[in-house]
């Protein structure tokens, strides 16, 4: 049996926590995720597998960036001695207005107490925070073009528990293909899915029913990454 084998772990999850304000009144929040902003600013409505962004009122409010996190952490399995364990989810993005150089923003990935790993689609780069330092890795703008309808994926891989010399890593996909390099440097034994967005809505696939709702990326063919960003290997 190869210790290079990666096993996808289905893990039911949903978006539950809003970590941003639409305005000083905090109209839309975790306890009231389906409201609207009384000051006319852009706001979100939160559902279990999707986030709907509503643009600000014309000549009144401002479009604001909204931040959301999932209900459950993804934790390193304690008793998996044989396989690399893969957690993975995908989001399909939809611009509020499909314009060039508009206010569309989307950041999606994982965070923990000491780490952040994310793809900043609007800035064409991968962002990560390890050892208290922030790093940005530009993506090839010919290879990576962000558009409405794109499917972005986030993967978190833990090594077998009997391979303490190996490190967990994070990777990203776009429309079923790997993008950029993988990232090491996770200091905690867990990560939580999160996203932030502006003028962009998302539909999420947490992988609970792959028979009827498959990922764009074939997780069954994921091989243990061999190429990592240099800053994450120090």
Image (cartoon, rainbow, N blue to C red):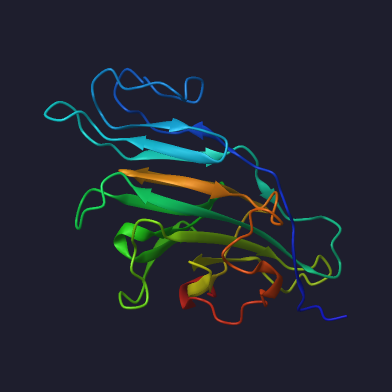
Residue 205, given in percent of the width and then of the height, sits at 58, 50
As drawn, is 47 to the left or to the right of 189?
Answer: left
Residue displayed at 24% across by 36% down? 63
Residue 217, given in percent of the width and then of the height, sits at 58, 67
Task: Determine if residue 130 is in view.
Answer: no
Q: Nearer the viewer, residue 214 or 46?
A: 214
128 relative to 182, above or below: above
Residue 3, given in percent of the width and then of the height, sits at 81, 78
As drawn, is 92 to the left or to the right of 186?
Answer: left
Q: Nearer the viewer, residue 129 or 99?
A: 99
Residue displayed at 67% across by 77% down? 223
As drawn, is 57 to the left or to the right of 199?
Answer: left
Task: Determine if residue 71 is in view.
Answer: yes
Residue displayed at 65% across by 42% down? 13
Residue displayed at 21% across by 53% down? 99
Residue 8, given in percent of the width and then of the height, sits at 73, 62
Residue 127, quarter of the rendered image: bottom left
Residue with the most extreme left position: 59
Quadrant of the frame with the N terminus:
bottom right
72 relative to 105, above or below: above
209 relative to 172, above or below: above
């Amino acid at each position: 049996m190869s210790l290079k084998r990666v096993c996808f772990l289905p893990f039911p999850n949903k978006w539950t926590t809003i970590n941003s304000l639409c305005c000083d009144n905090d109209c839309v929040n975790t306890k009231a995720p389906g409201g609207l902003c009384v000051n006319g600013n852009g706001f979100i409505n939160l559902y279990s597998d999707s986030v709907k962004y509503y643009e600000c009122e014309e000549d009144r409010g401002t479009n604001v960036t909204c931040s959301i996190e999932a209900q459950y952490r993804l934790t390193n399995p304690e008793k998996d001695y044989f396989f690399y364990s893969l957690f993975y989810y995908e989001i399909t993005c939809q611009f509020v207005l499909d314009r060039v150089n508009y206010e569309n923003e989307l950041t999606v990935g994982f965070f923990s107490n000491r780490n952040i790993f994310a793809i900043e689609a609007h800035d064409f780069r991968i962002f990560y925070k390890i050892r208290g330092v922030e790093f940005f890795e530009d993506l090839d703008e010919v290879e990576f073009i962000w558009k409405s309808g794109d499917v972005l994926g986030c993967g978190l891989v833990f090594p077998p528990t009997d391979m303490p010399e190996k490190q967990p890593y994070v990777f990203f996909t776009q429309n079923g293909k790997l993008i950029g390099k993988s990232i090491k440097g996770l200091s905690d034994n867990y990560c939580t899915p999160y996203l932030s967005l502006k003028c962009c809505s998302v539909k999420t696939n947490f992988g609970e029913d792959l028979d009827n709702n498959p990922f764009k990326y074939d997780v069954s063919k994921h091989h243990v990454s061999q190429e990592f960003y240099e800053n994450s290997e120090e």
